[in-house]
Image: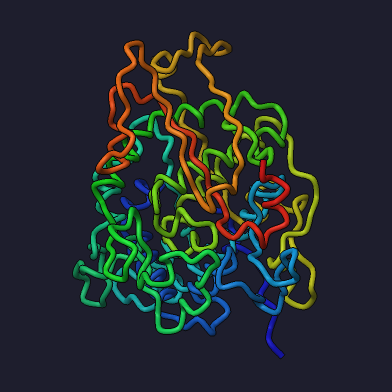
């Protein structure tokens, strides 16, 4: 009989999750994480706790995980476990990231025990290790060069990965995930997407064919271009006073945490014909997914600690809270990160003068423009963007630019509304409920 996997997170004592830049500076923890993630990558899809198996919980290929059947679509066929545009969106992802964290932790601790030199320090570093987060709302900047290198270089230098104590250059697991033979068998969609032809995860793919590569230049340009807006929208979360408005609101508003989450998925994967992070059924295969969702969890914890409001209770399948029975973590049980033995350091304080850049007159007054947009979410069969321009002299906007990303660089561009749409909406009852 197959054992039941219990989602516990890393074991006690409670330890902080670190921002990725601080995490990289902790050479032992960073070295262990890199090796643990590469180990996870090497495990077969048939293993219930391999990287592939953990990632597919979020979407494709649809099917059971750990003997838990997924929800069914309106046609009675299985779909992904994850929830989007629902009030449980934030709480469902908490045990998901905790499950990933516990598997990284296990492998890091096994690796740490192999070190002979400075062995106690390595074991302590492994014990302290938690999933890092990427604070893309950091006032000091969204994407410093060190992070750009981490996300795109093929190799990364880590502290001793061998017993001789020398630094080593190893395959960089933050860059991409290579799919092994047979792992893309369940990637065929209706309508079809190029994902089935891509042998590795991509960001801003250069083509729709198997030769496609990630485009670092566009990734860097778009994130830095939109970084101030993301930071501003994140700052505004503190003004929201209900869980529904803060968490999701069914995708109806632009200032919920889920909407910021959606924007970041698009900005990471690519807004037009994007890579894996831009596609709900495949997003969790991109290693940035885990850094991104740890940040979403951190912002959830920050707002919850200030407002003391939480989601209605519901079970979060397939994440068991027992290894002997089919009982699952529910919203009420996971209101605090300490439920999974991690915490976050106190948030950074607002930088002096930062708010004035965006019209923040004082702590309670914000002057801003707003645009109300009504749209049919599934008219185009996938993600789309509505770009906004402001001009007094009716400067022409190119109707057919050579590169659509050039539109973001026009001087009268003022913002965009980006969607994060399930392309298989006909199979999703929740999608249909939020179609308009």
In the displayed structure, would residue 264 be above or below residue 186?
above
- Across the whole image, how many numbered discs are drawn on residues? 0
The answer to whether 295 appears left or right of 322 in the picture is: left
The residue positioned 54% from the left and 57% from the top of the image is 280
Work out whether residue 124 or residue 3 is closer to the camera in this orientation and state it.
Answer: 3
In the displayed structure, would residue 77 be above or below residue 250?
below
Q: Position of residue 170 (x, y in %)?
A: 25, 70
Colour scheme: rainbow
Residue 334 appearing in the image:
yes
Q: Position of residue 55 (x, y in %)?
A: 52, 67
Work out whether residue 398 or residue 384 is closer to the camera in this orientation and state it.
Answer: 398
Q: Quadrant of residue 363?
A: top right
The residue positioned 70% from the left and 47% from the top of the image is 86
In what quadrant of the picture does the N terminus appear? bottom right
Q: Position of residue 434 (x, y in %)?
A: 69, 45
The residue positioned 79% from the left and 68% from the top of the image is 327
The residue positioned 34% from the left and 40% from the top of the image is 223
Q: Position of residue 174 (x, y in %)?
A: 35, 60
The answer to whether 222 appears left or right of 134 in the picture is: left
Residue 230 appearing in the image:
no
In what quadrant of the picture does the C terminus appear? top right
In the displayed structure, would residue 63 be above or below residue 289?
below
Looking at the image, the residue that sits furthest to the bottom is 1
């Amino acid at each position: 009989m197959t054992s039941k996997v219990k989602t516990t997170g890393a074991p006690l004592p409670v330890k902080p999750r670190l921002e990725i830049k601080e995490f990289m500076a902790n050479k032992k923890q960073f070295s262990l994480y890199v090796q643990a993630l590469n180990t996870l990558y090497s495990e077969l899809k048939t293993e219930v706790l391999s990287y592939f198996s953990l990632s597919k919980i979020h979407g494709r290929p649809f099917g059971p995980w750990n003997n838990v059947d997924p929800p069914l679509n309106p046609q009675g066929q299985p779909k992904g476990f994850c929830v989007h545009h629902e009030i449980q969106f934030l709480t469902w992802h908490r045990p998901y990231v905790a499950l990933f964290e516990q598997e990284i932790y296990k492998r890091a601790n096994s690796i740490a025990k192999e070190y002979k030199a400075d062995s106690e320090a390595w074991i302590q570093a492994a014990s302290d290790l938690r999933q890092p987060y990427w604070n893309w709302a950091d006032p000091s900047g969204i994407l410093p060069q060190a992070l750009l290198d981490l996300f795109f270089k093929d190799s990364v230098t880590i502290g001793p990965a061998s017993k001789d104590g020398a630094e080593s250059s190893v395959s960089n697991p933050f860059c991409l995930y290579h799919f092994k033979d047979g792992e893309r068998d369940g990637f065929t969609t209706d309508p079809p997407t190029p994902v089935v032809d891509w042998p590795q995860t991509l960001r801003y793919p250069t083509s729709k064919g198997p030769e496609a590569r990630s485009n670092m230049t566009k990734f860097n340009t778009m994130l830095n271009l939109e970084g101030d807006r993301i930071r501003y929208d994140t700052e505004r979360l503190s003004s929201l006073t209900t869980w529904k408005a803060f968490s999701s609101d069914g995708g109806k508003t632009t200032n919920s945490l889920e909407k910021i989450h959606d924007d970041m998925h698009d900005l990471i994967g690519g807004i037009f014909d994007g890579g894996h992070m831009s596609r709900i059924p495949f997003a969790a295969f991109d290693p940035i997914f885990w850094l991104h969702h740890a940040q979403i969890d951190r912002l959830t914890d920050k707002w919850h600690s200030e407002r003391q409001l939480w989601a209605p209770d519901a079970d979060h399948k397939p994440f068991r809270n027992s290894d002997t029975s089919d009982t699952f973590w529910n919203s009420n049980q996971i209101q605090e990160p300490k439920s999974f033995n991690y915490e976050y350091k106190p948030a950074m304080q607002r930088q002096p003068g930062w708010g004035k850049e965006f019209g923040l007159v004082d702590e309670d007054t914000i002057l801003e423009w707003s645009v109300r947009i009504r749209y049919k979410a599934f008219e185009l069969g996938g993600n789309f963007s509505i770009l906004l321009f402001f001009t007094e002299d009716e400067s022409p906007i190119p109707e057919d630019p050579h590169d659509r990303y050039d539109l973001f660089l026009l001087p009268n561009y003022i913002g965009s509304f980006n969607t994060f749409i399930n392309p298989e909406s006909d199979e999703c009852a929740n999608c249909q409920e939020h179609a308009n």
